[in-house]
């Protein structure tokens, strides 16, 4: 759909307006700081509509949360992640995390070249696939290149798989104990 402008030409609707003026020295009540604007506008016909975007803030919170979760598990093997996107790129911390979570031992490449990094990440991805963890559009080069969105997606998938497995085991264990005692409540 489109909207006709005052001169009769076709104007795509909604039309994004340039965001440069807000972020380059001009401040408005809704634009945040000069360095970090948090407002974008859309042209919808003759109306200008402000649109907030919190993706950067959400990514920062997820990165911090996921880093803490990883470190909580990696401390068992005396490893630590400072920067989630950087420290998973060579695959070693990713393999160590999977080893801690699963109790299995995985092979790893010892070299430092890109090929070795890609291979280590692929070992981790193959292991997850073997455990029926569904990975959608996450490739070894995405993690090796430090792609923030796909790294967050991979860690979220690992959290869901291993935390859910853990809680299911706990719930089933409690249910089995109740059945043994005859206190099911059903």
Image (cartoon, rainbow, N blue to C red):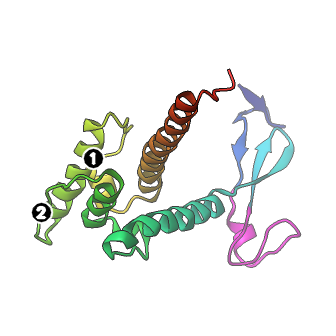
Q: Earlier in the sequence, mark 1 or mark 2?
A: 2
Q: Quadrant of residue 174?
A: top right
Q: Secondary structure at mark 2?
A: loop
Residue receiving disc 2: 109
Q: Within 10 angstroms of label 1, few (less than 14), some, or many (20 or more) residues?
A: many
Residue 72 in picture, x, y percent from top left: 46, 68
Span highlighted in magenta in the image? 18-38
Q: Quadrant of residue 38?
A: bottom right
Q: Quadrant of residue 43?
A: top right
135 or 24, which lies in front?
Answer: 135
Q: Is residue 36 magenta?
A: yes
21 over 53 or under it: above or below: below
57 over 1 or under it: above or below: below
Q: Which mark is residue 173?
A: none
Q: Residue at x 77, y 31 (%)?
A: 3
Whether residue 86 is visible, yes or no, is no
Q: Which mark is residue 125?
A: 1
86 over 123 or under it: above or below: below
Q: Residue at x 75, y 47 (%)?
A: 42
145 or 22, which lies in front?
Answer: 145
Q: Residue at x 82, y 38 (%)?
A: 45
Whether residue 171 is visible, yes or no, is yes
Q: Is residue 160 left or right of residue 50?
A: left
Q: Is residue 45 magenta?
A: no
Residue 125 in picture, x, y percent from top left: 27, 47
Q: Are circles 1 and 2 on residues that touch, CB within 8 Å? A: no
User: How far separated are the C-alphas under marks 1 and 2?
Assistant: 14 Å
Q: Secondary structure at mark 1?
A: helix
Q: Quadrant of the N terminus?
A: top right
In the rendered image, the residue lying farthest to the top is: 186
């Amino acid at each position: 759909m489109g909207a006709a402008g005052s001169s009769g030409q076709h104007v795509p609707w909604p039309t994004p307006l340039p965001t440069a003026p807000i972020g380059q020295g001009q401040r408005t009540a809704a634009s945040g700081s000069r360095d970090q604007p948090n407002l974008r506008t859309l042209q919808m016909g003759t109306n200008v509509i402000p649109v907030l975007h919190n993706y950067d803030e959400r990514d920062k919170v997820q990165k911090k949360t996921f880093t803490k979760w990883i470190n909580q598990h990696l401390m068992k093997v005396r490893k630590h992640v400072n920067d989630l996107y950087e420290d998973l790129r060579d695959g070693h911390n990713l393999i160590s995390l999977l080893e801690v979570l699963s109790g299995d031992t995985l092979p790893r490449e010892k070299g430092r070249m890109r090929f070795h990094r890609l291979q280590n990440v692929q070992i981790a991805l193959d292991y997850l696939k073997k455990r029926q963890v569904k990975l959608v559009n996450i490739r070894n080069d995405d993690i090796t290149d430090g792609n923030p969105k796909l790294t967050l997606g991979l860690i979220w998938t690992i959290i869901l798989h291993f935390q859910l497995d853990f809680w299911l085991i706990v719930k089933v264990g409690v249910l089995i104990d109740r059945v043994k005692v005859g206190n099911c409540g059903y």
